[in-house]
Image (cartoon, coloured by chain):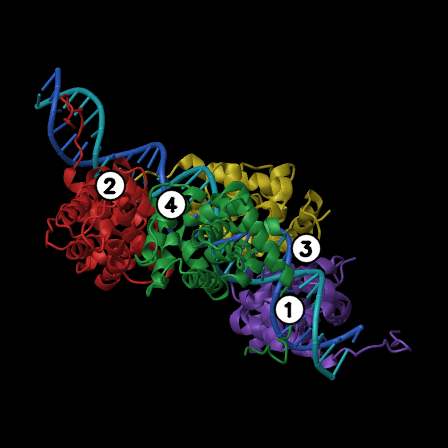
Chain colours: A red, B green, C purple, D yellow, E cyan, F blue
Amino acid sequence: MNAPPVTPSPGRPRDATLDANILRAAMELLGDSGLNAVTMDAVAHRAGAGKASLYRRWRSKDELLADALALYSPVDVEIDTGSLREDLVKVYEVYYGIGNHLMQAAIQEMLGNVRMHHAWTEKVAPQRLAVRRATLVTMFERAAARGEIRMPADLHLILDVVPALVLYRFNMRSQKVTRASIAKVIDTLVLPLVAAPDTGERP
Amino acid sequence: MNAPPVTPSPGRPRDATLDANILRAAMELLGDSGLNAVTMDAVAHRAGAGKASLYRRWRSKDELLADALALYSPVDVEIDTGSLREDLVKVYEVYYGIGNHLMQAAIQEMLGNVRMHHAWTEKVAPQRLAVRRATLVTMFERAAARGEIRMPADLHLILDVVPALVLYRFNMRSQKVTRASIAKVIDTLVLPLVAAPDTGERP
Amino acid sequence: MNAPPVTPSPGRPRDATLDANILRAAMELLGDSGLNAVTMDAVAHRAGAGKASLYRRWRSKDELLADALALYSPVDVEIDTGSLREDLVKVYEVYYGIGNHLMQAAIQEMLGNVRMHHAWTEKVAPQRLAVRRATLVTMFERAAARGEIRMPADLHLILDVVPALVLYRFNMRSQKVTRASIAKVIDTLVLPLVAAPDTGERP
Amino acid sequence: MNAPPVTPSPGRPRDATLDANILRAAMELLGDSGLNAVTMDAVAHRAGAGKASLYRRWRSKDELLADALALYSPVDVEIDTGSLREDLVKVYEVYYGIGNHLMQAAIQEMLGNVRMHHAWTEKVAPQRLAVRRATLVTMFERAAARGEIRMPADLHLILDVVPALVLYRFNMRSQKVTRASIAKVIDTLVLPLVAAPDTGERP
DNA sequence: GATTAAACGAGACGGTACGTCCAGTCTTCAG
DNA sequence: CTGAAGACTGGACGTACCGTCTCGTTTAATC
């Protein structure tokens, strides 16, 4: 679907290891010293690269950072606990890097910058967000098959509830992203919205 | 409870009209030409002020802009349609400046900059956000009294749902804030969460 | 010649001690921390005065500093050693504050700022420079009367030689003003220019 | 004696033409509109450069202006009229830009700012002032060889007389620098100090 | 092995906004 | 009207960062 070009362009090929070095440098700066410290000069310097090498790979700082986050954000998680609530809590724990120190710091920095968050969403979607979304949809479908929930018509909107609330409460209420805060949103908002009807079927 | 000091501080007092001039200048630039046009120099120039007067009042550009938004954000709206849904749609229309061109442009610019949004929340909360929150709580209480809804235990979280989803979908999905998008969130998420228990009529 | 007004102007009279306080504050800042530290705010603060009181008395910072120097610069020195060379060395020692620590520092700071030097010359001339000039002329006349020198036609130019060379060598050659450097100029330039003819009269 | 480094420093080299552009821009502003018009922004703009490029080359405005003057100050003049007086008048005419409008304006502006004058002397001395000094010494030596003057022991001090008096009288007495004022200093002060001993003819 | 063309580290470049500083003026209230 | 205090306009300063550009050097694929 994305075959490499048959005739490789002449000249020196890109140094593939450099991509990772740059992204790692960006993440380290982000985690160590906060978003303000992540300047393109600083990233280049830390990666032992020239700025041109950064801009050859990414069009802007935001896109670079988005990729950096993407690289360090888990994609394909296999979770099936038999309970939608447990599935959701666990998967969002992973998505928000709970328990991974560097990721946690970096993600939380990123949440504070919407342009970056947006670039991340834009760029990462094809490869990763769609996967995440599919993962979540599967969880809901399994739960519906188990009779645990009814399948809501507006699932796409419901799937936005957790990230939206996390983003909002992190930025607007300076509330850290923790297992508890995620669970609270799931319990209070998500699950009630898909709760199975009180008694059996009702046509 | 907060008696003004008996001895006014010496020296020339701040020019109170200048605060408003500066904030208005900032808003006009924001509405006319976008966030990029809002430089401290431009604001000062347009307000007929010196930059020092800006920095005497606000520590940074973000704080100034937050206050500018606050000044123009409606605080005390009297809405009571007899229907929670209509109340909510109407009040959020006002809060998001639907129908007010300048506000609309300015708010949407601000939604795109979380540092600004955050500063706004930080500084404005005591005076304005609390008022808004109280307004909303009253709406829910009236609806509960009418039997339209049950009063949820976690109302504070539910009150975040609209702003959180609006912010998220605006930034992450590049979705404009319109009456329809607000109504959709209310209908799909907020109202179901507070729906009256399944007693009583069902058509 | 300068009778006080018969009808004292109404309102609070000027605080005469304030003039001196301000000038002293200026000199102390100059001597302690250098010319850069002498801002109008700093002077006012140190003098316990308001800036308006400074500008009520002097039209500009330069004029204030000029007066400050003037106040601390000796005016009327009585020197008559019987030797022109000794007279000159001694009088310039006094004028340049050699031996007076504060004056020394302040004057040397002032030499580095020609606008200030100029303001000093302008403002102080009527009261002080003319006196100085007369003092010097008298010294030359006495020496001529003693037959020690001949009275040069261009004495006014010769009288500029010491201050000019001191200013130039201080600024351009970073050469401190000392007794020795003054004496050198006098011996090498001034005295030879007015040396008595080698033998007695020559018509 | 000062072999260039074998390995040129890495990275993009400084644009040598930019130095000249910046300096020229500074001089043009100085000559056209006076010292007040010479702001770093204005210089950068006129030179088509960014401010960073100015500050990469000079630590401060004063140093930049000093170099600007230096670039436009004549260095190597060939003058040998057979008369010391004529030599001196002519060479100082050149040094003070008499007859060159831009230079004249710029120099006179600079004379009024000793910090600038100082920076000029500091930075320019090695390359230019030493050359000037050598030129002047040669003139005196030729005159001495011709028997026109005796060679004074303290020539270095005498060489300061013209610039010192010019600087002093320009600043302190607001006296323009003209051919006549230079000639007067030479005739009244310099030449008498090196006059040949009273042997030989006297008309 | 020579050629080629692109990637590389380094860092200069234009542009632009920031936040600081200071001179000189103005405004308040107290004496 | 003078006093202290301090806010006011105006404008230059020097710093920082983005995204682009040029150096001289290195590296693989092609000739």
Q: Quadrant of the N terminus of chain C?
A: bottom right
Residue type at tag 3: Arg
Residue pictured at 43% horizontal, 64% vertical: B145
Q: Report the residue marked by disc 2.
A: A124
Q: Report the residue marked by disc 3.
A: D169
The crowding category of the residue bearing disc 3, from other C-alpha atoms within 10 Å (few below 14, some 14 to 19, many at least 20), is some
Q: CA distance from mark 2 to mark 3?
A: 73 Å
Closest to the camera, between mark 4 and mark 3, is 4
Q: Nearer the viewer, residue D5 or D166?
A: D5
Above-or-below relation of B156 to B107: below
Mark 4 or 1, nearer chain start: 1
Q: CA distance from mark 2 to mark 1?
A: 53 Å
Above-or-below relation of C72 to D55: below
Q: CA distance from mark 4 to mark 2?
A: 27 Å
Q: Which mark is residue B13?
A: 1
Kindly identify which chain the residue marked by label 3 belongs to.
Answer: D
